[in-house]
Image (cartoon, rainbow, N blue to C red):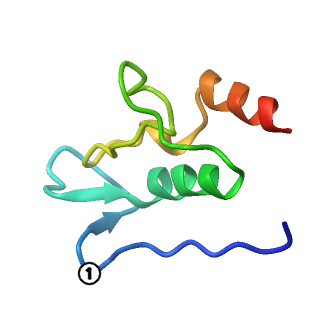
Amino acid sequence: MREADVRFDTADHDFTNKPTASCSNKYDVRSVGTHEAGHVFGLKDIYGAHDNLTMCGSSILYSTRARTLAKGDVLGLRNIY
């Protein structure tokens, strides 16, 4: 891979860089960016009992938990590469 583009849907979603519990209906831009970078590197969305992973299929409003990779995300990348 030489290049990849990621587009954030700002028409339907609001993003913030400093999420707090008072940020109603906003997503952490760094968490979403890390998740989308996972797709660039070949990871797929994960559903079920793995909501602590960056590649969890549904983002959580004003949560920063996906800013870094969890162990399962790292293992998935190691499996690919």
The residue drawn where x is 36% and y is 24% is 48
Q: Quarter of the image holding residue 5?
A: bottom right
Identify the residue at image location x=48%, y=42%: 45
For the C terminus, which image quadrant? top right
17 or 15, nearer to the observer? 15
Residue shown at the point (86%, 72%) measured from the top left:
2
Which residue appears at 31% of the width and 52% of the height? 19
Single out the residue that lies furthest toward the top: 49
Location of residue 59 in the rendering, given as x and y in whole percent from the top left corner: 34, 46
Would residue 16 be found to the left or right of residue 8 on screen?
left
Q: Position of residue 62 (x, y in %)?
A: 27, 48
Out of 36 and 23, give the one closest to the viewer: 36
Image quadrant containing the N terminus = bottom right
Left or right of 17 in this view: 5:
right
Q: How many marks?
A: 1
- The secondary element bearing badge 1 is classed as loop
User: Label 1 is placed on what type of residue?
Assistant: Ala
The quadrant where residue 71 appears: top right
Q: Nearer the viewer, residue 65 or 36?
A: 36
Say if 15 sits above or below 10 in the image.
Answer: above
Vertical position of residue 28 compared to residue 58: above or below:
below
25 or 4: nearer the viewer: 4
Place of residue 30 in the rendered image (x, y in percent of width and height, measured from the top left): 49, 56
In this picture, residue 37 sits left or right of residue 30: right
Q: Which residue is mark 1?
A: 11
In the visual, does 25 lie left or right of 58? left
Q: Residues within 10 Å of mark 1 (few under 14, many from 20)?
A: few
Q: Using the image, determine if residue 23 lies above or below residue 50.
A: below
Residue 9 drawn at (x, y percent): 36, 74
Determine which quarter of the picture holds residue 13: bottom left
